[in-house]
Amino acid sequence: MTSTKRSGISRRGFLGATFAAGVLLVAEPSPIHASAAAGDVTLSAGGISILASVGGRIAIRDGSSVIRSQGSKFQIKDSSTGIQLSTGGTPSLVTLTDGTPGIRMDYTMPTAAGAVAVYGLFSVSTNHAHLEWHISGPSTLIPDGFLFSRAILSASEADRFVPITDWVRDDGGGIPFEETSGIAHVSTWNAQHGMFLLERSKQAWTNSTWIHSPGVLQADGSYVSQADFFFSDTRPSATAVMGTSRQLGVEIWTDKAFNIWETAGETMSVTALVANGCEAARDVKLSWWVRDYDGTILATEAVVTNVAATSTWQHTFSVSAPAQGIALAEISAASDADVAFARTTLTVLPSRQYLAGEASMFGIANYPWLQVPSATALLDLWQKVGINWVRISYEGGPGLPPSAFDERGMFHNVELQPSLEASDAVAAQWAAAKLATAVSAGASYFEVGNELNRPFNTGVAAQAYIDKALQPVVVQAATLANPPKILNNGLAGMDKPWVENFYAAGGWDLIDGFAYHPGRGNFTPDYIPTDENWEATSNGRYWNFYGGLLQLKELMAEYGEKEIWLTEAYACTRPNGWWNDTYRHAAENVLLTLALAKAEGIRCVCWYQFHDSVLGQPQVANAEDGEYHYGLMNRDVSAKPSLLAYATAARIFDQATFIGWLAFDDQNLRGLLFDTPDGEAAVLWSRADGYILNPDHAADDPHFAAPEVWVDPWPTKTNLTVSTAAESVTQLDSIGRSTALTVTNRTATLLLDGAPRIFFGLALSGAQEGALWTSGPVTVQARRDGERISLLVTVLNSAASNADIRVTTPFGENKLTKLSGGQTAEQNFPTESTEISNGQVTVAIYHWNNGNPDRTRYSVNYGAFTLRSWLAEN
């Protein structure tokens, strides 16, 4: 055997560790056997063998010599020659630098590949195969385009793409976050699992026959692409820890889809799996806590056990579900100086029926590209939180077909992207084909493109958009009997120069509705820049919500009204970045964004997006890239507080009608008033702490030490005492938690800050009646009487005999004679005022005994009352 040097490339995270023999399924390392005969080369170790054959085939077999995976090709990509696939290969038995046997496969590349050369090195240890490919060639090689072929045989279920992640604490302070340490492509044969583990790999470039395996540049200018394969009977994360000799790993999950429970008091069971990657047993302390949204510890525990070498320990703990809300769970495993931890959320969200139907404002941007744990479970959750519109669905497209939504009574649109560089003929062909797609899908609206207004805030792209995209679609739609309604491309930001140029070029009359993506940086949703110099930089004021919306409505007042579709709205939660929302701010901003949208008559808000991570890299963690943090759900498909905020808004505003803005004596207080089937709902908040979020950061540093989700970020609290409509007031916070407030004499005192809250039971549009004030048989109540107040005095004659009654008030006096025993009399005293102060009513009741009066006198002190409406004057 010849000696061949194995690559010494380094890997980040756990892939930097040395692979250990004998770590999976068997306790001790097993001997490695090698043989070569008739062109085939075989390597075997405990539980695994590799068979290499002439032609390039590499087959991985289990301990029973059953082939589980096989492939024969390697793909390279070159900017000059394009994609090139190997056409054959010759295996040979070699000795690796550590003295163990290996297989070398010299691949045959096509002539078109030029000077590219590829060989593979393959080795085995217990239940583990290491695979690497060495690629040399011209500088035009594109290493991110490397793939190796493999086909999984006789699997019992579909393969899974499983990112392996680590929770880490930020050295700069703030909340912990996840990092991706590897990508696993997992196959299953009943109780046995097989897993290809790579440092990086894109799901979008992987299919049933190929795995994306990018190359890493070497010092000599060549590239190495590598993967490791494991047989295992445990979860992928534990397999990765043990297979790479990592010290400790921990993973947590529940048996509930999305970690969501239905009702308070249910037992929430959380399972932790600890993996010991060491070659020796060790004592491991498993600690966990669960905190509610206010930081109160709902449960905590610590247990210690001895975990065998290269094995796992599973432990389940339980906590009683709180009322509607969300809790954060953290579990850590520690042994000596080694610590691993993980987090997830536990949510309680009761079901709710939504009745708005097609008139609903609540939608989702994108499409269901991550269907975990299943498409059915995902759509069940979408409907549970009130999602009724889906931005994109068509036959053969990504996500789910239109029939999946039709079956549930959900509504769906289509958005497709044109090219502004196309010829007129190609543009016309595109318009005809894509309009046909929209019609076939039963789309209600066709959004013609996405964010085609670059460069932002300049307006230069408007004419090309009309000529190459919109006009061809409108011309084609005119030939149809029942075309979908047409939306312009959803603009990135409210791009006023683009809209002005679009109108000037005749585009306004071509659309049925106007679509845009408001965007938002570290500003509250109700922030309005004080001047028109809105910088469209990455951290500029161009990215504001309410200011841009009002700017659009001003233009519409001149150009003509259109439906407004916010086809992407968001609250990005990139960890420890000042430009983005903290998890708590995100929930507040989701609720306020949707409340403002409802108040301004927005036709639909399509939230961007449902899941963290990105299409093509589902459930991959990336703490630095904001695109991975736009979801209502966490990477592990547990809920963010944002999901509950969305559900709260949908439940309150499903059939709501906007009454008006509220105005208070304190100029920092803000309010919106809605009429709902459950009564008037007021959304109230304060801006005493301003409109800028996360203000404490260095100007030249993107880092911000974000507080934990349970930390209240608003220092200034304001009391507001208002009249109530009855004897009860209910407050809902941004995640829908309900609190009954104290009501005294038809008034309640509210505690307001920068977080929006919803209140039911307040008399903010003007009280109809005041509190009941009673003394003995006398009751006094102030009531609305048209545009003035009347004081209603009710007297009960509790005696058996007739009574004469004298009622004296600040607004007049009345006498009543011969009120029968057991009867009640009402006396109404009109005032000429809309507001009365505290006062007193006296009632004298006379009973006659043989002509002699027997008088009883009652005094009733009543409180002030006002008809004042807190609605702002238009």
Image (spheres, rainbow, N blue to C red):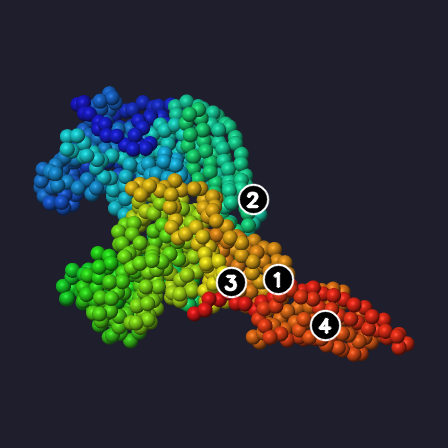
Instruction: Using the numbered discs, state the Cα–Cα distance from disc 3 to disc 1 in whole angstroms.
Output: 17 Å
Q: Give the x, y percent position of residue 690.
A: 41, 52
The residue that mark 3 highlights is 681
Residue 419 or 435: which is nearer the viewer?
A: 419
756 relative to 420 in the view: left or right: right
Q: Give the x, y percent position of residue 336.
A: 44, 24
Which residue occupies the extreme right position in the image?
A: 850
Q: Give the x, y percent position of residue 773.
A: 69, 64
* Amino acid, disc 1: Arg
* Amino acid, disc 4: Thr
Q: Do the CB atoms of the residues marked 3 and 1 lie less than 8 Å apart?
A: no
Residue 542 or 502: which is nearer the viewer?
A: 542
In terms of image quadrants, where is residue 812? Answer: bottom right
In terms of image quadrants, where is residue 811? Answer: bottom right
| Numbered tag placed on residue 746 in the rendering | 1
Mark 3 vs mark 1, foreground winner is 1
| Numbered tag placed on residue 86 in the rendering | none
* Amino acid, disc 2: Ser
Instruction: Using the numbered discs, state the Cα–Cα distance from disc 4 to disc 1 in whole angstroms.
Output: 24 Å
Q: Earlier in the sequence, mark 3 or mark 2?
A: 2
